[in-house]
Image (spheres, rainbow, N blue to C red):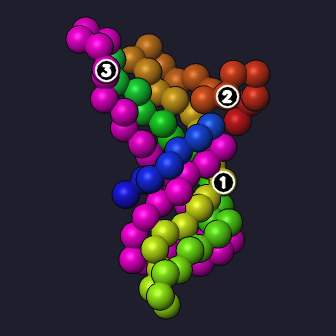
Amino acid sequence: MIRDISDRGVYVTGLVSPPIGAHLGVEVHLPSVEPGSGSVELYGEGTVVRIDKEAEHISGFAANVAFRTEIAGGSAPARPGIVN
């Protein structure tokens, strides 16, 4: 489950993690917050940069991710002015 998300990455909680340096694809679906407006989908690729452990068990991992958004009319960069 995604705990935190920003324009540069995600933090995912869970009991398993890919290794540091692993390449991964990320898809996040955000529902509409207003009636009649469309939902937003974020797509990205990134790299695992940190794994957190609590009492010898994995609790989550952080990944740098370059996102693109998908809105009803087509895709657009998640960070305007930066080409992915």
Amino acid tagged 2: Arg
Looking at the image, is mark 1 or mark 3 earlier in the sequence?
A: 3
Circle nearer the viewer, 2 or 3: 3
Q: Split into 4 quadrants, where in the image is the C terminus?
A: top right
Stretch in magenta:
8-37
Residue at screen point 37% across, 38% down: 29
Element on which disc 1 rests? strand
Q: From the image, tell me which residue sits under label 3.
A: 33
Q: Mark 2–mark 3 contact, CB under 8 Å? A: no
Q: Is label 3 in a helix, a strand or a loop?
A: loop
**28 left or right, relative to 5:** left
The residue wearing badge 2 is 79
Q: Is residue 48 left or right of residue 5?
A: right
- Residue 13, relative to residue 45: is it above or below? below
Report the residue marked by disc 1: 64
Query: Residue 30 at x, y = what percent?
Result: 36, 33
